[in-house]
């Protein structure tokens, strides 16, 4: 007869025993390529607005460009990012989990120097931030993060929730070590100085509720941004000034005839009377025209060469 070992654990130990959780193995753990593309478009829109915020606050030209998105487990993210640093941990309700913006100390000190009226150049101290410096950085980052709200607009409605700062990734418990994250490397340039690299990290649990939306909106988001950019370029092209030339048919002379020309001489043109002139823009033919007059100025009347031949 089989004997069953008695349960020697105390009642308190049995009461805190973990309960099993349901796990769907069919649930994706990472983003597909088109979903990454949609997320990258969101980040590009966000960084354009964030660049304007920094430039307006610090009175210096800033450029923020996002690199190729990478998917890594949280354990690899911790080992890749510089530590210590200034780390802004923020939430995007109603999305679950939290995200973070990692900034190296070198960058943060330059931003603080600019905010206090300095040049942001030269050697910067690599130390922990003071309370005043933490407030300065928090206010700058908070105003930039607000630009995520309109950037996520084509995908979903979010808000900027809680925001707190950490000085080391060792104090950040974002997700489990094996959980996949999307790491967005960001190149930040101040004026013409060499770029400094920072990064934003979105854990997959935060993105999981919008994966289907990212999948369905990938192409529409890209098309919308591209069509908007195309419309702006087309609109701006209509304001570009161009030189318009009105030309007769060319006349051929010998070099002897050209050298012998003097004031008062008449040069016979090969352009027949009644033949329309050619209007060119940058040596590209555009229209036919007939000479006329408007007030005291010589002008050209656009015409059809066939109509001119009929009148003649």
Image (spheres, helix red, strand yellow):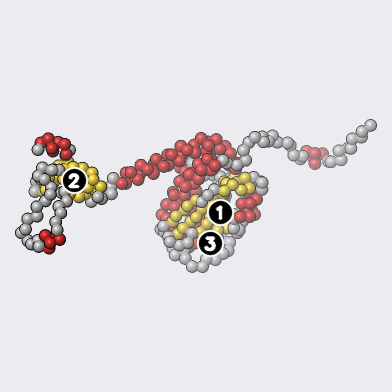
Q: Quadrant of the C terminus?
A: top left
Residue 277 in the image, given as x and y percentages of width and height: 16, 45
Q: Are marks 2 and 3 in contact (CB under 8 Å)?
A: no
The disc at residue 106 is: 3
Task: Please say if the residues under marks 3 and 1 sit with CB atoms less than 8 Å apart.
Answer: no
The residue drawn where x is 58% and y is 61% is: 128
Q: Give the labeled residue for mark 2.
A: 278
Which residue occupies the foreground of this view, 281 or 77?
A: 281
Q: Is residue 172 left or right of residue 17?
A: left
Q: Give the foreground label among 2 and 3.
A: 2
Residue shown at 42% from the left, 39% from the top:
224
Residue 147: tell me if it is visible.
Answer: no
Question: Gap between marks 2 and 3, in whole Å?
Answer: 62 Å
- Going by the picture, which residue comes out furthest to the bottom? 123
Question: Quick one: 21 or 7, which is closer to the camera?
Answer: 21
Q: CA distance from mark 3 to mark 1?
A: 12 Å
Q: State if disc 1 and disc 2 touch (CB < 8 Å).
A: no
Name of the residue lying farthest toward the top: 1
Q: Secondary structure at mark 3?
A: helix
Seen in the picture, residue 218 relative to 173 is either above or below; the reply is: above
Residue 102 circle label: 1
């Amino acid at each position: 007869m089989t004997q069953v070992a008695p349960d020697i654990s105390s009642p308190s130990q049995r009461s805190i025993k973990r309960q099993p959780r349901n796990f769907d193995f069919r649930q994706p753990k990472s983003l597909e390529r088109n979903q990454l593309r949609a997320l990258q478009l969101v980040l590009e829109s966000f960084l354009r607005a964030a660049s304007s915020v920094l430039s307006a606050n610090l009175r210096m030209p800033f450029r923020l460009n996002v690199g190729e998105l990478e998917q890594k487990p949280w354990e690899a993210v911790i080992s890749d990012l510089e530590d210590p640093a200034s780390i802004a941990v923020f939430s995007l309700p109603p999305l679950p989990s939290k995200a973070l913006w990692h900034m190296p100390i070198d960058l943060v000190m330059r931003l603080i120097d600019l905010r206090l009226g300095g040049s942001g150049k030269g050697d910067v101290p690599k130390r922990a931030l003071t309370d005043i410096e933490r407030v300065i950085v928090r206010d700058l980052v908070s105003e930039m993060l607000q630009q995520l709200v309109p950037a996520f607009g084509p995908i979903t409605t979010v808000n900027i929730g809680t925001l707190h700062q950490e000085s080391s990734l060792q104090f950040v418990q974002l997700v489990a070590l094996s959980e996949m994250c999307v790491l967005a490397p960001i190149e930040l340039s101040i004026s013409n100085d060499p770029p400094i690299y920072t990064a934003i990290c979105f854990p997959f649990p935060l993105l999981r509720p919008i994966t289907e939306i990212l999948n369905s909106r990938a192409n529409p988001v890209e098309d919308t941004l591209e069509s908007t950019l195309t419309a702006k370029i087309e609109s701006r092209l209509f304001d570009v000034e161009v030189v318009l030339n009105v030309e007769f048919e060319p006349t051929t002379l010998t070099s002897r005839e050209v050298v012998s020309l003097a004031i008062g001489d008449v040069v016979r043109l090969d352009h027949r009377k009644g033949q329309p002139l050619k209007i060119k823009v940058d040596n590209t033919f555009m229209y036919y025209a007939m000479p006329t007059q408007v007030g005291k100025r010589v002008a050209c009347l656009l015409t059809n060469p066939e109509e001119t031949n009929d009148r003649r």
